[in-house]
Amino acid sequence: MNKRSAIKLIAGGALLTGATGVLTACFEEKPQFRSVDITGADYAKDFALTDHNGQPRAIRDFQGKVVVVFFGYTQCPDVCPTSMAELAQVKKLLGANGDKLQGIFISVDPERDTQPVLKAYMANFDPTFLALRPTLEQLPAVAKDFKIYYKKVEGKTPGSYTMDHSAGSYIFDTQGRVRLYTRYGSGAEALASDIGLLLKKA
């Protein structure tokens, strides 16, 4: 083999190696989330609400943690307590990474869900979880930002109404970016798996 042929062979090998690298980058596997991947969504980006301790909160307060945001109300008979209990179970399933999960409950019933009521309610699930209370004026804007549905359903007496509302949760990564939407009833194991993937990529 002469010198010119050897140079061509080396150059060809370098090109092939480069092309393989490009193809590998193009076909790099995305995380196999069980929830709905909404990475890059132009909604559900942030909130500016007061928690059950009277502290103003925004998504940036939880940098380094995966944040799960659920909308509900304390007098909800089934979906809300089930979802929050499931989230508490997720924290246990995460083991040593449990402290990197932040549960957030946003009330759609600020008339009845006062700060003391919300604080007592969250104590039933996990002491680190926070409940946020929008004012009646803030609630429509927050619901619109997060594309969630809520509607007051009148009862037999003025205080016995119920609230219809969306039942899924939004999941933010450790950088405060909305990444996933998990439907009600997906199960603690599936949610823990997705959160584990987000923490692994952090």
Image (cartoon, helix red, strand yellow):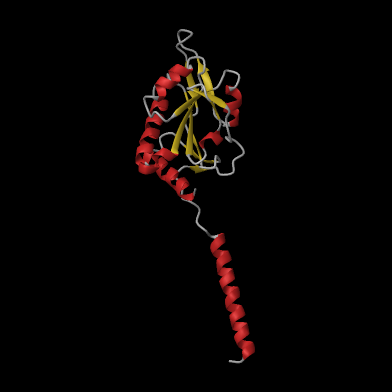
User: Which is more toward the observer, 14 or 58?
Assistant: 58
- 85 sits to left or right of 177: left
For the point 56% across and 44% down, the residue is 39
Q: Residue furthest top?
A: 157
Residue at the extreme bottom of the image, as rendered: 2
In the rendered image, the vertical position of residue 39 relative to residue 148, given as above or below:
below
**At 59% from the left edge and 44% from the top edge, which residue is drawn?**
40
Q: Position of residue 138 (x, y in %)?
A: 59, 22
Above or below residue 155? Residue 74 is below
Residue 76 seen from this side: no
Name which residue lies at 41% across and 25% down. Answer: 122
Q: Looking at the rendering, which quadrant does residue 192 occupy?
A: top left
Residue 30 position within the rendered picture, expressed as x and y whole percent measured from the top left: 50, 53
Give the percent coordinates (x, y) of residue 18.
59, 70
Instruction: Give the side of residue 162 with respect to residue 177, left or right.
Output: left
The quadrant holding residue 94 is top left
* Residue nearest the viewer, comparing 153 with 178: 178
Q: Position of residue 190 (x, y in %)?
A: 40, 42
Tally of marks:
0
Considering depth in this image, is 86 or 102 the residue closer to the camera? 102
> Vertically, is 43 above or below 151?
below
* Quarter of the figure with residue 59: top right
Specify the quadrant that holds the N terminus.
bottom right
One can see residue 20 in this view: yes
Residue 75, above or below 94: above
Image-based side of 177 in relation to 155, left or right: right
